[in-house]
Image (tube, rainbow, N blue to C red):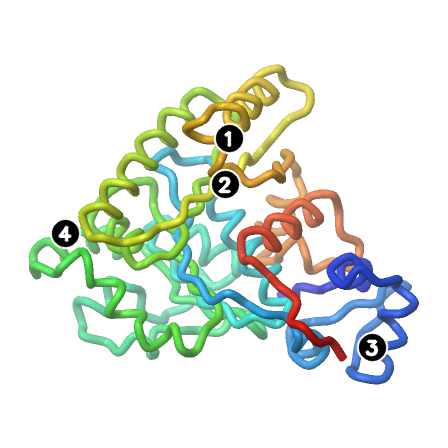
Amino acid sequence: MQPKLLIDDISKLLNESKRKVKKRMKGNCAYQNCGGKVFLTHDESISFLDFLDFKEQVMSFHLIKGGVGKTTLAQSVASRVSVYGAKVLCIDLDQQSNLSQAFGKHQETSPNVYDILSKNIPIKDAIINVCPGIDLIKSSLSNAKLDHKIFLDNHNVETFFSDMIQDLKLEYDYIIFDCPPTLGPSVKSSIIASDTIVLPINPDLFSIEGLKICIEEIKNLADSYNKEIDIKIIINKYDNRTILSHEISQFLFETDYFKHLVLPTVVHNSQDFSNKLSRGMSIFDSPSQKKSAKEIDDIVIDLMELRLCQTKK
């Protein structure tokens, strides 16, 4: 897995012509070329895009309805922001290990969060590298016992994950939890530890119901623990051919309860996601990137609040 940042995207970010960007690249960093496509990888972006300002965040991808694409979006967002030069830690909490599989690491024998808790393993010993810029704490079936273990050991839901990742926040620009579709102690603790909760939603009525429940629970937790938690909704798997996609999206963008939470970019249904994830790749691995990659890029710039510093090279 090796996500790529194309010169076209750098040009858009800097609001400069590709010719000007490439000229600056020649004087300041190494870059790569494949099939006529000029691009940077994580290590190259660190030096060339050192004027980018990352707003460090802990983020949870969650919805109590499965099949909404939260793992796909978590993997895609992590892959994209890493190639801007950010350092990202992903924590897979779902016993189905979909995020671990999406990164091609599901067969690794490294500890998961349940192992950290039950065997008193230092969290840093559970971290494995996926590719430059992305580390992972993988999951496995034993994470199914995590909620019960938290309950039996009488761990404080408010501080369980907050304490666990406290030192790691100094090492990573972004920490991303991929949560199972539940509201058990582990998910509640990840929500409390997060600055932002990302709620992917398919344009269907069942997802709307799950969305309402999640928002209510997040607000209740924020009030109970006096925590400011930002909520962002991503409309995923949008299909231009269906009336329902249009109606649900319009409802979310126009309803007072939701409209200030919805990101402006919708992610269209695309086979490109499953084709890449099934091989442990990201949609940014290919120098020829499709519409889905552009949509995720727009989401990352909004979601991660990427900003340019005052001065550029």
Residue positioned 86% across, 81% down in the render? 26
* Residue that carries the numbered disc 1 in the rendered image: 202
Which residue reaches farthest top? 243
Q: Secondary structure at mark 2?
A: loop
* Residue that carries the numbered disc 4 in the rendered image: 148
Residue positioned 59% across, 62% down in the render? 81
Alpha carbon distance from label 1 to label 2: 8 Å
Using the rendered view, name the quadrant where residue 59 is placed.
bottom left
In the rendering, at what x and y percent does residue 69 appear?
50, 40
Alpha carbon distance from label 4 to label 1: 30 Å
* Residue that carries the numbered disc 2 in the rendered image: 69
Q: Report the amino acid beneath label 1.
A: Asn
Question: 156 or 261: nearer the eye?
Answer: 261
Q: Report the amino acid beneath label 3.
A: Met
Q: Are marks 4 and 3 in contact (CB under 8 Å)?
A: no
Which-is-in-front pick, marks 1 and 3?
A: 3
Alpha carbon distance from label 4 to label 3: 52 Å
Which-is-in-front pick, marks 4 and 1?
A: 1
Q: In the shown orientation, is residue 53 left or right of residue 226?
A: right
Position of 292 relative to 46 (above/below): above
Position of 153 relative to 94 (above/below): below
* Residue that carries the numbered disc 3 in the rendered image: 25
Q: Give the quadrant of the N terminus.
A: bottom right
Which-is-in-front pick, marks 3 and 2?
A: 3
In the rendering, at what x and y percent does residue 54 appear?
55, 67
**For marks 1 and 3 on the same chain, the one whose residue lies earlier in the sequence:** 3
Q: Residues within 10 Å of mark 1 (few under 14, many from 20)?
A: many
